């Protein structure tokens, strides 16, 4: 390519993005405009530029460049000038697809110094080189997808009407997944999904290999998903490998798994794999007569029901290893132990040791999550159900098509439960828009949910296309002609919500806990949301669900957005430190204000536990997509027996499907002290080198990595004493 003098001037050379310096050539602008604006047909159903239009743009860009006193051009600078010209000529959509996405150098610098862009959006991400790289990639990806999706959906997200979760992964991966271990125990392990880039392992023949394969499944899966990974029925499906083990070997196997999962520091952006395991004390009714699948075969003469003693013993071993903690005495915060509650586990003294160990673990570390199958709406004895990620619920009814084939593992048929995407609705915003009129409230709710539904359907179409093209290879793998590991059509499309408490407060003048009228309206809104959900499922054939979303960042983001767009109302309703939040709002959006999560009572409300339970349990049967009941513990050393009694009452006498007991913890990095409470210095050695841990939404993590709103919520929590 030779230099060309134009009107007596020599244009400056161009430093291209690929690292090559070349002479300026306006024909390359024409060529790129003709190629890249083709994308408007696919994204916006509009026409690309014609060659004549592209040449007019290129001529004007050339004139601008010749009028500048530049010694060197760059590809990005030329593109900026082209974009200005596109806008001047009215080609806004064409400019969208031609624009260069990226971030200011200042933000890059801040990220590399553990500050700046979304530095505390996800408390599971600790500062390290992988995190810094992920944050820069996230910025680029989010900016790109907001340009690629329909503008009314992008605008609804940016305004704060809705929240598109995990936006950085919008076009490449689904949300979360609970895996059927039998699939890998029968077919073996291909971590890359194809066997091209990694070695392929045959089915595990020994317990240690089975445990390692299980850990690697969750590690590999997180490269294909945006959210948590887990195993339902974990203790049952592991039992065939453990059936002749004594207590020592069971404990060693359990310990191996916990260390493997918490030391797999390779998840998205360099973090521990966000994971969970469902711990059954025995063998559920559904699985009693199902043939064992392990060691690469299906055993026609061995049933899971034959292994109940092993399942029970392994459950005890797991919980006892969780209780020990790691070498520093800290908790194993992953995989989250989801201890299943069934009537017979409480009625039969044989299982009392599991229930006690679970309560002891809650008392020591707060780690245990309780997955309650007893309420009728869970369908736990006749179907398959689990909680995943931060309290999302997935299930398959016993009457569903091919259910029995999956139980029997016929021709590799297996369960695939998970979520495609979550879109959360800002309920306080719905109330503000309604003008205080209840009929109008339901209209605004429907129109906002319609946008969420449209976004979810778009996501499903995008991910299904990627899946069918083999671009989500671990999920789409088909070893030896097996069915795909993930049934992409069975993933839930979840509509979440934040701020029911503030919605009813705006409409009635009362928070949920303050008056029956507020509770009545909350139920009415949830029932309406479920009615709308059903209509979406009937219309599309898709699995829509309604859930309380964890909203680690969305509860803050919505509150901040409403302080900006609806200050007259939001200033009266947002929770947290409003004065401090307003003073910081011009400098940062990470401020200590938030909306209440889901349909939860205000965390600061000084209510007896029983009173809060009476209110919140009523929402669980409606929220089949997931909810959680939090017990914030105020004692440094809670009584395990008291917790066990409370667990039995919650399991057998309430509608709560999922709960946890949160204990605040201090860990000293000098002397190794681990104890209850949020201390600024070590009670034993006096060192200021301490870490505080507590539960953020649905997992434990170091408080220093929380965003300002969640740290404020931690201060605001009303804690109860059980003794």
Image: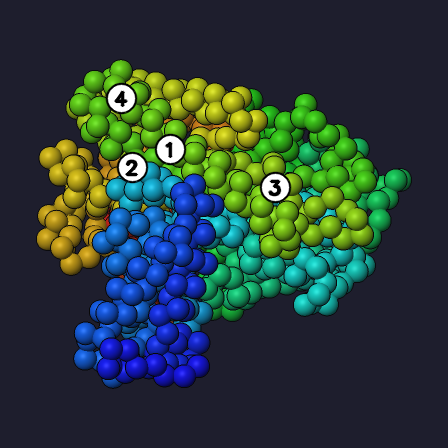
Residue denoted by label 1 = 451
Q: Nearer the viewer, mark 4 or mark 1?
A: 1
Which label's residue is closer to the chain start, 1 or 3?
1
Where, by quadrant of the figure, is residue 454 drawn?
top left
- The residue positioned 29% from the left and 25% from the top of the image is 444
Q: Residues within 10 Å of mark 3 (few under 14, many from 20)?
A: many
Where, by quadrant of the figure, is residue 86 drawn?
bottom left
Labelled pair 2, 1 in contact (Cβ < 8 Å): yes
Left or right of residue 375, residue 431 in this image: left
Position of residue 120 measured from the top left corner of the image (x, y, whole percent): 32, 59
Q: Residues within 10 Å of mark 4 (few under 14, many from 20)?
A: many
Count of residue discs:
4
Mark 3 secondary-structure assignment: helix
Up/down of 560 relative to 258, above or below: above
- The residue positioned 26% from the left and 35% from the top of the image is 602
**Cα–Cα span, label 2 and label 3:** 28 Å
Q: In the picture, which quadrant includes the N terminus?
A: bottom left
Position of residue 600 measured from the top left corner of the image (x, y, whole percent): 33, 33
Up/down of 422 relative to 262, above or below: above
Residue denoted by label 2 = 161
């Amino acid at each position: 390519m030779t230099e060309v003098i134009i009107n007596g001037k020599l244009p400056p050379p161009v430093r291209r993005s690929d690292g090559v310096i070349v002479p300026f050539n306006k024909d390359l602008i024409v060529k790129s405009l003709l190629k890249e604006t083709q994308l408007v047909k696919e994204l916006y159903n509009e026409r690309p530029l014609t060659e004549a239009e592209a040449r007019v743009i290129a001529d004007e860009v050339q004139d601008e460049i010749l009028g500048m006193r530049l010694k060197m051009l760059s590809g990005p600078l030329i593109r900026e000038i082209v974009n200005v010209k596109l806008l001047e000529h009215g080609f806004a959509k064409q400019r969208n697809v031609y624009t260069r996405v990226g971030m200011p150098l200042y933000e890059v610098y801040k990220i590399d110094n553990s500050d700046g862009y979304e530095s505390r959006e996800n408390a599971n991400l600790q500062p390290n080189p992988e995190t810094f790289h992920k944050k820069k990639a996230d910025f680029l990806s989010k900016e790109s997808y907001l340009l690629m999706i329909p503008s009314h959906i992008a605008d609804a997200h940016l305004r704060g009407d809705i929240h598109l979760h995990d936006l950085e992964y919008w076009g490449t991966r689904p949300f979360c997944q609970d895996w059927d271990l039998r699939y890998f125990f029968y077919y073996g392990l291909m971590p890359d999904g194809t066997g091209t880039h990694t070695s392929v392992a045959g089915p595990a023949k020994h317990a240690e290999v089975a445990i390692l394969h299980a850990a690697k499944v969750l590690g590999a899966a997180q490269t294909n998903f945006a959210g948590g990974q887990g195993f339902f029925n974990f203790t049952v499906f592991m039992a065939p490998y453990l059936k002749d083990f004594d207590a020592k070997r069971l404990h060693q196997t359990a310990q191996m798994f916990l260390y493997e999962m918490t030391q797999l520091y390779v998840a998205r952006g360099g973090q521990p794999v966000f994971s969970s395991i469902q711990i059954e004390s025995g063998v559920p009714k559904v699985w009693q007569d199902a043939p064992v699948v392990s060691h690469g075969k299906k055993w026609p003469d061995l049933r899971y029901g034959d292994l109940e003693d092993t399942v029970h013993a392994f459950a005890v071993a797991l919980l006892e290893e969780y209780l020990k903690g790691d070498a520093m005495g800290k908790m194993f915060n992953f995989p989250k132990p989801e201890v299943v509650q069934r009537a017979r586990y409480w009625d039969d003294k044989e299982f009392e040791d599991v229930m006690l160990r679970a309560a002891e673990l809650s008392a020591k570390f707060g780690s245990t999550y309780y997955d309650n199958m007893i309420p009728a709406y869970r369908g736990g004895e006749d179907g398959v159900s689990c909680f995943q990620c931060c309290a999302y619920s997935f299930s398959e009814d016993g009457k569903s098509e091919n259910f029995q084939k999956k139980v029997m593992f016929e021709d590799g048929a297996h369960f695939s439960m998970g979520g495609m995407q979550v879109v959360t609705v800002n309920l306080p915003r719905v109330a503000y828009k309604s003008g205080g009129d209840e009929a109008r409230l339901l209209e605004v709710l429907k129109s906002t949910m319609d946008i969420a539904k449209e976004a979810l359907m778009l996501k499903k179409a995008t991910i299904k296309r990627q899946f069918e093209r083999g671009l989500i290879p671990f999920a789409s793998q088909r070893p030896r002609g097996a069915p795909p590991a993930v049934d992409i059509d069975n993933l839930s499309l979840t509509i979440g919500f934040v701020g029911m408490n503030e919605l009813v407060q705006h409409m009635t003048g009362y928070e949920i806990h303050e008056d029956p009228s507020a509770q009545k309206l909350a139920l009415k809104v949830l029932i309406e949301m479920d009615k709308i959900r059903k209509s979406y499922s009937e219309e599309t054939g898709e699995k829509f669900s309604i859930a309380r979303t964890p909203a680690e960042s969305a509860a803050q983001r919505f509150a901040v957005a409403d302080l900006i767009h609806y200050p007259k109302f939001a200033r009266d309703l947002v929770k947290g430190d409003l004065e401090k939040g307003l003073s910081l709002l011009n400098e940062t959006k990470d401020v200590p204000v938030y909306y209440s999560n889901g349909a939860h009572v205000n965390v600061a409300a000084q209510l007896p536990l029983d009173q809060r339970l009476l209110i919140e349990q009523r929402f669980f049967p409606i929220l089949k997509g997931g909810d959680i009941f939090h017990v914030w513990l105020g004692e440094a050393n809670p009584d395990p027996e008291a917790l066990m009694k409370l667990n039995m009452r919650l399991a057998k006498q309430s509608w709560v499907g999922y709960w946890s007991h949160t204990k605040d913890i201090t860990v000293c990095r000098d002397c190794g002290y681990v104890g209850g409470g949020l201390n600024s210095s070590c009670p034993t050695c006096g060192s200021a080198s301490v870490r505080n841990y507590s539960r953020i939404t649905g997992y434990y993590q170091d408080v220093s990595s929380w965003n300002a709103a969640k740290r404020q919520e931690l201060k605001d929590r009303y804690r109860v004493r059980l003794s």
